[in-house]
Each structure stands twice: as C-alpha cells, then as structure tokens.
Image (spheres, grey):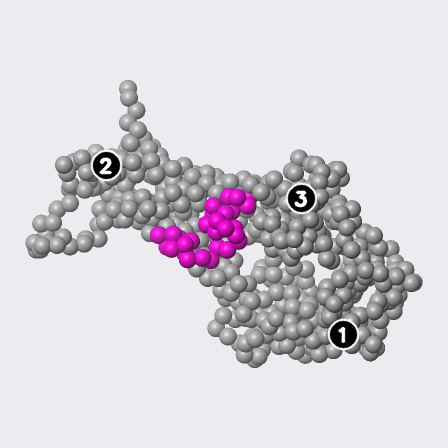
C-alpha cells in the first residue's frame, strides 16, 4: 500500500510527452494519470452538484433520528379486546362478499365489509353503517399514535397528499399541537390509522428527495435520471480513487513513517 | 503569509479522499446497484401471485360472532382463503391462528406438506421445492420477523425462498439472490455491519460529513481546474 503511494510528484498536463509513440495526426489516448484526472474533472464538472447533494443529503439523513423520522413501520396493532359483547351479529351483506373483518374501533366493535356495495363499516351490534366523522378520526389518531396533546385542526383529504402518498383516500388529517407539528392520517372509509408524520420526517423527506432525485413523487429511486447520474458518479469515484495513488508523495507521510533514511 | 487557497483546498480534498476514499467507492457502487435493479423486483413481487378475489358464501360458514365467543382474546378476526378452504384468521396479542370456516374448529399448526402446499399456492415460478425447514431461530435475511416460520426454497438460479407462517399458512416474506445482494449493498451503504438497519451510527455520521467536505472542496477545485488551462494556452 505504502509502496504504491510512493510515486513521483503529480504530473502536470504540460509534462505529457509522446516521444515513445510514433507520431500520428490524432493524439492517441494513453492510459495515464492525466487521462484519469481529465475524466475526474469533467465528470466532476457535469455531475458535481448532484455528488455534493448526495453527500449532504446522506449526511443529513444520518443525523436525523430514525425514531423521530418514523413512518416506516405499519400502524400499531389494535388495542387489546376486553371480551366481546354477546350481541355481536354479522350484518346484512349484498352479493359476493370479498372480505369481512371484525375488529374494535375506539367507539366499539365494527365489521369491515367489502361486497357489491363497496368497502364499508357496520356497527357490529346494530348493523348500522359507521361513518368516520371528524371527532372519531381524531380519537382514533390520538389512541393509535399515542398523542397526549390537543388537536390543532382536522381536515378531510379526497386525494392523498405527499405525506400520505402511500395510502388510499379519502382520509382525515389530524394535526396535533406538539413540538413536531405531528399530522396523523386516518382512513375515512375504514377508520384505520394510516401514518403519522412530523417535522423531522418532513425534513427527512425533503433530503430523501434530493438523494433519490425523484422531484415529483419522492418515492422512486429506479428512474433513468438517477441511473445515468449514478453511472457517472462511478467514474468520478473510480478515477478519484485511482488518482489517490498518484497524488501523494513519500514525504507527505513522514509524519507517520518517519523521514527516509537515504535522503 | 498569504494562504494559497488552491493548495490548501487541494490538500483537504486529497487527505479526506485518502480517509474516506474506499467508502466513497463503495457508496457509488452500492448506490448504483440499488438504483439499477428495480425495487419491486428486489422485493420479489414477481415471485408471488396477487390474491384473487374469490368471494365467500357467508351463509355456509360459522359466523364471526360464534368465533369470537369461543375465542374471547381475539383482537381482530378476518375471513380468508387458505388452500382453497375458507378460514377465520384470529389475531391475538400472542399471535395468529386459524379457525376452520365450516367446522369452527381451531386448526393445528401446519404440517410440512401443508406448508409446502401453501408456498406453492402463491409461487409463480417452477414449483419444485429444493428444501423446506421449520426455523426456530431467524436467519439474518428475516431481519426482525418473529420465528418460528417455514423456510421453503424453490429451484432456481436466484434461490427463491418463501417464508410461511406455521400457524396461518400466510406468506411472511420472499427472498432471492438479488434481494440478498441488495441487503449486503445496503449494509455497506449505511455502514451498519451488525444490524444492517441503524442509519444513525457514528461511523456513518463521520464518514458522510467527511465526504461532504471532500465533495465541496472538490467542487471548489473545479473553479481553478478549467480557466487556468485556458490562460496558459493563450
């Protein structure tokens, strides 16, 4: 390793000599530190900004506390049941039943049914339709995401926003008055707690966008732009790594290796 | 004494590169792998079929109220198909199990043949099974999933493996060679060599900020790298 680093001083462009090669009209491409330095410079010029953004966004993501970013794990499991009421009764269904689930909502047991009338909730005791109203959504959000602070505002979304982009609308966005400015999302159809987002996540998501270069949806990291730039970055790092071996002189390591005795 | 900025910045760039160079090479290689192979493929979406909506005839099944009356610790009860028969999936704080939709009897844990049949019923490729094992300890590739589970490997160059729950017959995870490479690449990318999941580790923080300064000093050097040449030629 050290031996490889003990190389002549870095070549300046002017020091290129072609005298060993037969003269030709076009300069032959020679594998040399100069060529690698050129590649390094030009790729750096073209893709340098993204390279800087990758390092900065990566460093910021490493700093942001994963726990506070959150949002990756599914919603917490439903609260433990304290036994089931004896008057639970399967409600009327229509046509082919595709799915049926019995579970507890903060307001009591419900059936979630998917049949010819679509996806809906029914009260498990009376069979009456259950609509997820504002207040119920806030209660669900509070219990599912363990919020102990007051609700600041509630809004209904007919389309998922950027924060809840992985979930199906319609949904309720419940904003809590905490330091993180948390927003909890609850399905307006099934009452399921969907996801919780705070300011740490919002910062994280912005830098994640810079990192994955998907400036519109922020989700995909498999698009042609990033593959192209990533390929260029490989050239940048490979040539840079190679140049490391050409850029150091023996005397720069005197502080670790001591002075060369024969000098 | 005046500071020769180009020289100083160049030294910073060089020495930081010496310090984090190998990691930067690894970041670009692993990053390039992760962006090049589509994440849906990595997740193994191509290995399994989407469940078909077959529908249930509730009139011929044990009703939900009867199941929860017999299993009061139920948190959630869901009707689903398992190997072409309707079953109630009971979820409790301790875990999940199945209740036969027609008899209302709790089903015992899966036999090896049933686990293999469950895996085959969702698998899209060549149904030849190379090995099937009931694991009590989670292998590295199952991350934080809680055992036990059936590990069923199918024939194929990429060693496709499905993990099946021994109590419900449900698919827990799918793994294959490119997933394993991705996981290894991810480990190198985030520099967490033990758990492969902690993106806040101090090593990564030091390396990333060093890389930031290296990249910025490199960008700065570009300012001197191009105009200087022109002037000399002129």
Estimate the x, y position of residue B177 in percent, counting from the top left: 50, 66
State which quarter of the image contains the N terminus of chain B.
top left
Q: CA distance from mark 2 to mark 3?
A: 51 Å
Marks 2 and 3 belong to one chain: no
- Circle 2 is placed at which residue position? B227
First to last magenta residue range:
A204-232
Which residue is rendered at x = 81% and y = 51% of the image?
A: A106
Numbered disc 3: what chain? A
**Which residue is labeled 3 in the image?**
A183
A5 drawn magenta: no
Q: Secondary structure at mark 2?
A: helix
Chain where mark 1 sits: A
Viewer-closest of B66 and A170: A170
Considering only vertical position in the picture, is A194 above or below B78?
A: above
- Write down the quadrant of residue B57 in the picture: bottom right
Query: Which-is-in-front pick, marks 3 and 1?
Result: 1
Q: Are marks 1 and 2 on the same chain?
A: no
Image vertical order of residue B136 relative to residue A160, above or below: below
- Report whether mark 3 lies on the same chain as mark 1: yes
SS for dot 1: loop
């Amino acid at each position: 390793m050290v031996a490889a680093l003990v190389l002549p001083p870095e070549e300046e462009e002017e020091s290129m000599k072609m005298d060993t090669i037969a003269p030709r009209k076009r300069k032959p491409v020679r594998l040399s530190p100069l060529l690698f330095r050129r590649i390094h410079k030009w790729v750096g010029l073209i893709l340098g900004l993204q390279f800087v953004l990758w390092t900065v966004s990566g460093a910021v993501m490493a700093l942001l506390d994963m726990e506070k970013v959150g949002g990756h794990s599914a919603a917490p499991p439903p609260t433990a049941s304290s036994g089931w009421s004896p008057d639970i009764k399967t409600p009327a269904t229509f046509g082919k039943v595709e799915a049926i689930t019995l579970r507890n909502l903060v307001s009591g047991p419900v059936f979630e049914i998917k049949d010819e009338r679509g996806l809906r909730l029914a009260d498990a005791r009376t069979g009456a339709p259950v609509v997820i109203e504002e207040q119920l959504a806030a209660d669900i959000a509070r219990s599912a995401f363990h919020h102990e602070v007051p609700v600041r505002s509630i809004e209904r979304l007919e389309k998922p926003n950027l924060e809840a982009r992985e979930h199906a609308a319609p949904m309720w966005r419940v904003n809590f008055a905490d330091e993180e400015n948390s927003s909890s999302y609850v399905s307006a159809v099934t009452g399921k707690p969907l996801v919780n987002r705070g300011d740490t996540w919002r910062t994280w998501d912005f830098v994640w966008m810079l990192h994955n270069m998907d400036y519109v949806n922020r989700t995909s990291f498999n698009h042609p732009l990033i593959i192209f730039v990533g390929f260029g970055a490989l050239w940048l790092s490979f040539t840079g790594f190679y140049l490391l071996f050409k850029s150091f002189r023996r005397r720069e390591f005197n502080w670790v290796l001591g002075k060369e005795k024969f000098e | 004494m005046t500071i020769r900025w180009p020289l100083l910045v160049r030294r910073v760039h060089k020495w930081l590169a010496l310090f984090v160079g190998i990691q930067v090479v690894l970041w670009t290689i692993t990053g390039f792998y992760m962006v090049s192979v589509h994440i849906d493929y990595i997740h193994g979406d191509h290995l399994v079929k989407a469940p078909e909506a077959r529908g249930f005839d509730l009139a011929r099944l044990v009703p939900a109220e009867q199941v929860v009356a017999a299993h009061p610790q139920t948190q959630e009860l869901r009707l689903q198909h398992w190997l072409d028969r309707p079953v109630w999936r009971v979820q409790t704080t301790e875990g999940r199990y199945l209740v036969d939709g027609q008899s209302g009897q709790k089903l015992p844990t899966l036999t090896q043949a049933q686990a293999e049949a469950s895996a085959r019923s969702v698998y899209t490729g060549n149904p030849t099974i190379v090995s099937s094992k009931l694991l009590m300890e989670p292998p590295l590739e199952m991350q934080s999933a809680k055992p036990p589970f059936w590990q069923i490997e199918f024939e194929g160059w990429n060693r496709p493996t499905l993990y099946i729950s021994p109590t419900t017959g449900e698919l827990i995870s799918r793994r294959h060679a490119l997933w394993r490479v991705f996981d290894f690449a991810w480990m190198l990318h985030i520099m967490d060599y033990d758990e492969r999941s902690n993106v806040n580790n101090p090593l990564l923080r030091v390396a990333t900020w060093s890389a930031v300064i290296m990249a910025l000093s490199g960008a700065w050097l570009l300012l001197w790298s191009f105009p200087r040449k022109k002037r000399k030629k002129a």
